[in-house]
Structures are given as structure tokens and as C-alpha cells.
Amino acid sequence: MAKIQIKSETRHELSFFPNSFDDYVPKDSKVRMVDRIVRSMDINPLMDTYDGIGAPPYSPKMLLSLVVFAYINGVYSCRGIADALKYDVRYMWICGGKQLSFATINRFRSNHMIKCIDFYFDAVVSILVEKGVISLEEQYVDGTKIESKANKYTFVWKKTVEKNRAKLLEKTSAALAQIKEQIRLNGGSDIKEEDSEPATSAKDVERSARLCERQAKNLPKAKLTGREKQKLNTQIDHLFKASDKLCEYEKSLDILGERNSYSKTDPDATFMRLKEDAMNNGQTKPAYNLQIATENQYWTNFALYPNPTDTLTFKPFLDKYKKRYGKQSKSVTADSGYGSEENYEYLEME
């Protein structure tokens, strides 16, 4: 039996002329195309997001190429991108072998890239128009609901907040009247006219509580027993706690705006019914209503809305398209889910 010749392993051998990362990435690789497009764009909007304080940052173009290429390949988490920099030569090629931490990638994405996402989206669309791939004369509109990563048990409902706020204001008004009457009967100064109006906000309750606290301290000592004094102070403390709770309700209402719900861990998410319903019980989950417009299978517009239904997103979405490109497309195609008299009238006017 002839001896089999096996090629030797060279893994641990040093090379006199070491290869660069460029040698391992084919000339027609997708990563080269992405990097070439990103580096052809104006970097000034991205540079304007830096304040120049602290250590010199990594190249914004390099980081933008890295994140865009990762997204194209379905890698969305910062930890996933950081891992790819260790094991995937294409990612190593973009960063020249630099090992970036997930925190560095996250800071770039959260503090810088997010502020310029529309600018670079428009820049890519402009390239497609210049190449004749799209014309911006037509758009196909559709939407989908994207589930948030927020916990589904962290919901805040607008009706519940309004109901609890009204109840607390009612209880607080009654408690205030009782405290003021007790202060007056025990030798306290009369309540001024402007201080006797019913409290309608957390600020009103806090102001009245401080007034009652100040007057309670000035009461004649002979008028109240120690227990009565303690009870009065406890009632005033409850007013301050009620003021804090009302402040929470008011903040929740500010976050809600025109929405009916939001998630505590992701305030931008609204609770909606999704197509994926494993229990078939119509359970709502925190989600976003993503609207997109396409032409020739390329995105030409996108927006996130808190409205579960598509009819309410149609007009603002087309307005955003017009604002983005300075004109409206000649034709708009959408399914019956967008149909409403108001939307049809809007299209006729456009």
C-alpha cells in the first residue's frame, strides 16, 4: 500500500510577508459595495453629532459601514456585531481588525447614527434615482406591526390613568377641605381666596399642602393635643404623597398623548393586536405600526406610528413622502385597510 502524502499544517507558522484583510475579501464581495456607497456619502451630518469632548472617536464612516452591513446580514444587536468582528473576516475588513466593544457600537448607534438615519436613507434613494432604478413616480404603501421587546405586562392604559387621577383629585380636595377647617377651628389664619380654589393638578395640591404645613406649625400649642397634632401632620403628609402620585399620572398622560396605552419599559410602544396570536385570545402586545412605501422593491419611505389601524397613518405618511422628496408620487397603491372617505378625499386633492 502506497504511503499517503498529506499536506502539512501551517497554522502556527509565521509569514515573512503577512497577508492583509483585503486579501481575504473578494473584489465583488457585498461588503465592498456597502463600504463604497457609505464612503461616497456626505459625512458632515454625522460629524455634527459629535461634541469634540473626550478621547478621539472611531471613524464615523467606518462605524456606519459596519452597522449598515450588519443590518443587511440580519445582525441587529450590538453584541452580535461585536462578535462578528472577532470571527467574520468581512467585518474585520471594515474595521481593519479593530476589536470594538458592544458598548462602543451601541453609543454610535444611539447617540449619533439615529440622528442622521433619514439623511442617509434619502442619500441611498437619491443614488437609486440617479442610476435609473426608481423614479419616485409611484409608491406601494403597506404596513406591518413589529412587536416591541418590552414586557407585555408593563402596560399603562389611558382610561385607567384618567379614572385614578380623577378619584385621587376628589379625595385630595375633600382631605384639603377637612385639614383647612381643622386649622381654622384651632386658631389658624384664614385661607386666602386664591388658596381656597379646588386643586386640579399636582402643583396645586403641593402648593396647598405647603400652605397647610406652614399654618399647622404656627398653631397655638394649647389648642391641639399631641395626638391631634400628629394626626394633622399625617394628613398633610398624605397630601404630599398624593401630589407625587398626581405628578406620575400627569407624566403618564403626557407620554400617552393621543394614544390609549404605552409600555413602562418602552414608552414609544403602543399595545396592539398582532397577527401572531398563539393563544387565539386577542391579547394585545406592545408594538409599533411600521409603514413603508416601495418602488421596484426598494424602500422609498418609512415611518413608525402609534395607531393600530392603517387608516389614520395614511395621510401623515404621504405628507412625509412629499416633505422628503419635495413632491408627491403620481400614483399611490394601497390595500383596502387604508380605505376611508377622508383618505379618498385627500388623494383627490393631491
Image (cartoon, rainbow, N blue to C red):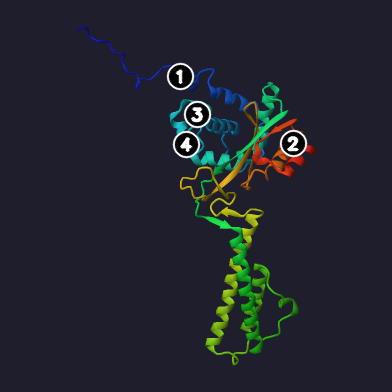
Amino acid type for the residue under numbered disc 1: Asn
The residue mark sitting in front, 3 or 2, is 2
Q: Residue at x 51, y 25 (%)?
A: 93
Image position of 300 with respect to 255: above or below: above
Q: Identify residue for label 3.
A: 91
- Marks 1 and 3, the one that precedes in the sequence: 1
- Marks 3 and 2, how far apart in space? 37 Å
Amino acid type for the residue under numbered disc 4: Gly
Image position of 207 with respect to 110: above or below: below
Neighbourhood count class around disc 1 (C-alpha, 10 Å): few under 14, some 14–19, many 20 upward = few
Neighbourhood count class around disc 4 (C-alpha, 10 Å): few under 14, some 14–19, many 20 upward = few
Residue 19, disc: 1
Image position of 81 with respect to 25: above or below: below
Q: Which quadrant: the N terminus?
A: top left
Neighbourhood count class around disc 3 (C-alpha, 10 Å): few under 14, some 14–19, many 20 upward = many
Q: Evaluate whether residue 350 shows in this view.
A: no
Amino acid type for the residue under numbered disc 3: Tyr
